[in-house]
């Protein structure tokens, strides 16, 4: 199959590449763009490790063709820190609340939680759990991930999050 | 986990999509949200030679009220159904069911058209469409036609869609004011297809069921309308004996596959329980 030229914005930078129609977006991101923060866990649309933000939606990038992202605006985990390089509220939350152990699910969790907080800046615990239902973590038991997201929500409002990590 | 090679096409109108499907022939398939098709392609259970991506067709998106009917464009996503005030006020059962489909990421991409056109017995929207008396608009090389959801499903992955046809919208008559509704879905975990599910839309008058429709998901190779079960509760106050009769009538038409979700007897048994629970919850909500 002939390769096709695509352009898109990734973490604020215009990028381009040649892709076969069947190239999955996650492979384009990891192999062509060398942005290996986006992980492949299951490759079957179940685990959410490959989640990226596309035009304001959380998408499992193993279940979309790169060619379909032509012209879109994408943010990956590499684009989650503040512009000056300091950690975002969410990243800080994952660090302070021990929201990760092996870290494999973390890029997908943070990218997904970012969109969740954009849509619902003050989620309840149930809303957080439902909001990250498409992201599987094999290590933490989710408790501290939920706290990390609560930490970020509180921080964005300028409130101190009092609970401790478990 | 890499799909076979295919040619990619992104038409900007329904007319162009139909022309493409006609000229590319049987090798071509429409691509909607891709959340049923791409996983099948990765497993090489589907190897289409061409994909006609419907995302470039602006006219296929949106929710419109047209008199006492709601028309939903095929490319409207589950996420958009959940965000819609129109759906919240006129067809709340669609939101209850959409929230039980997969997870947020899948719902941003998965479309109502793909969900009802797919023909997978595990999809949740088809049984709702039967329950609500919906019709599908199909457009193809020989023009447009409307097919009732109740006439659309012929077998697992076999539908009334002819080669080259696209499902462009779903039209749903508004349920009666004050109707009660419920979608009860038993699943093994979040994001799973139904082990068994039942949809109920009913109206109550003077404490008795005045009208009722019941749909069943993943309990047969097609979605089912449980007509005898619905008739068993009309005129009753949903007392224990009538509920038992309805569950038994529904179980009588179920023929689920035995799979990882359980043996046939189990799935029929829990299917009956889903019917009972949905009836009770719908009656509770009716005004
Ligand atoms: C992890 C996971 C869990 C899921 N759980 C559930 C669940 O619990 N319940 C549920 O209902 N679904 C579930 N799904 C499926 C999901 O809802 C799909 O999005 C949906 O089945 C298909 O919609 P789509 O827009 O993605 O269609 P696609 O995958 O693009 O298409 C599906 C099929 O329909 C055809 N098609 C699509 N649109 C049209 C059209 N307009 N006209 C004609 N043909 C068309 C395609 O050619 C293809 O054959 C799950 C998916 C995943 C990945
Ligand atoms: S790698 Fe995409 S969902 Fe698991
Ligand atoms: S931290 Fe190991 S999978 Fe989540």
Image (tube, coloured by chain):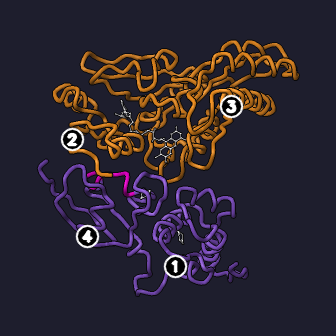
Chain colours: A purple, B orange
Residue lying at 45% horizontally and 25% vertically, measured from the top left? B156
Split into 4 quadrants, where in the image is the C terminus of chain B? top right
Q: Are marks 4 and 3 on the same chain?
A: no
The total number of labels drawn is 4
Describe residue B55's horizontal placement relative to residue B212 as left or right: left
Distance CA(mark 3)–CA(mark 1)? 45 Å
Distance CA(mark 2)–CA(mark 3)? 45 Å
Secondary structure state at the residue bearing disc 2: strand
Residue named by callout 2: B9
The disc numbered 4 marks a residue on which chain? Answer: A
Q: Check residue A33 in the rendering and tell me which mark sits there, or answer none.
A: 4
Residue lying at 44% horizontally and 23% vertically, measured from the top left? B136
The disc numbered 1 marks a residue on which chain? Answer: A
Mark toward the start of the polypeptide (2 vs 3): 2
Mark 4 and mark 3 in contact? Answer it, CB < 8 Å: no
Secondary structure state at the residue bearing disc 1: helix
Secondary structure state at the residue bearing disc 3: helix
Mark 2 and mark 3 in contact? Answer it, CB < 8 Å: no
Percent across and percent down for residue B144 are 33, 18
Q: Check residue A91 in the rendering and tell me which mark sits there, or answer none.
A: 1
Q: Residues within 10 Å of mark 1 (few under 14, many from 20)?
A: many
Q: Is residue A5 above or below residue B152?
A: below
From the image, state whether disc 3 or disc 1 is nearer to you: 3
Residue named by callout 3: B266
Q: Are marks 4 and 1 on the same chain?
A: yes
- Front residue of this view, candidates A164 and A119: A164
From the image, state whether disc 2 or disc 4 is nearer to you: 4
């Amino acid at each position: 199959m002939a390769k096709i030229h695509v352009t898109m914005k990734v973490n604020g930078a215009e990028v381009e590449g040649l892709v076969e129609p069947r190239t999955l977006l996650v492979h384009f991101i990891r192999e062509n763009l060398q942005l290996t923060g986006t992980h492949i866990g299951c490759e079957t649309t179940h685990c959410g490790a490959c989640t990226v933000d596309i035009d304001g939606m959380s998408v499992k990038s193993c279940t979309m063709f790169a060619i379909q992202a032509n012209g879109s605006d994408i943010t990956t985990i590499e684009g989650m820190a503040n512009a000056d390089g300091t950690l975002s509220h969410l990243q800080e939350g994952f660090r302070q609340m021990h929201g990760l152990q092996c870290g494999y699910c973390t890029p997908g969790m943070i990218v997904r939680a970012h969109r969740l907080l954009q849509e619902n800046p003050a989620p309840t615990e149930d809303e957080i759990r439902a909001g990250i239902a498409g992201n599987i973590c094999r290590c933490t038991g989710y408790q501290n991930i939920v706290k990390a997201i609560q930490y970020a929500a509180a921080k964005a409002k300028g409130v101190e999050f009092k609970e401790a990590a478990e | 986990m890499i799909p076979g090679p295919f040619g990619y096409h992104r038409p900007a109108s329904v007319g162009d999509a139909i022309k493409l499907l006609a000229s590319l022939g049987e090798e071509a398939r429409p691509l909607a949200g891709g959340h049923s098709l791409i996983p099948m392609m990765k497993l090489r259970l589907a190897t289409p030679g061409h994909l006609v991506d419907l995302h470039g067709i602006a006219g296929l998106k949106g929710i419109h009220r047209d008199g006492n009917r709601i028309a939903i464009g095929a490319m409207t996503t589950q996420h958009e159904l959940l965000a819609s005030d129109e759906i919240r006020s006129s067809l709340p059962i669609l939101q209850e069911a959409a929230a039980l489909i997969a997870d947020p990421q899948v719902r941003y991409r998965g479309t109502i058209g793909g969900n009802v056109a797919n023909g997978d017995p595990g999809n949740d929207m088809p049984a709702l469409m039967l329950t609500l008396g919906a019709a599908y608009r199909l457009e193809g090389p020989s023009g447009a036609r409307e097919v009732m959801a109740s006439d659309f499903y012929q077998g697992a992955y076999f539908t009334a869609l002819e080669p080259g046809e696209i499902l462009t919208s779903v039209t749903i008559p508004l349920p009666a004011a004050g109707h009660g509704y419920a979608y009860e879905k038993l699943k093994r975990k979040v994001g799973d297809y139904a082990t068994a599910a039942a949809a109920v839309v009913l109206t109550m008058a003077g404490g008795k069921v005045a009208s009722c429709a019941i749909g069943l998901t993943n309990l047969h190779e097609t979605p089912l309308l449980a007509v005898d079960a619905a008739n068993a509760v009309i005129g009753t106050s949903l007392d224990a004996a009538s509920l038992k009769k309805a569950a038994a009538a529904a179980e009588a038409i179920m023929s689920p596959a035995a799979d990882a979700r359980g043996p046939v007897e189990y799935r029929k048994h829990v299917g009956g329980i889903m019917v009972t629970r949905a009836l009770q919850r719908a009656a509770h909500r009716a005004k």
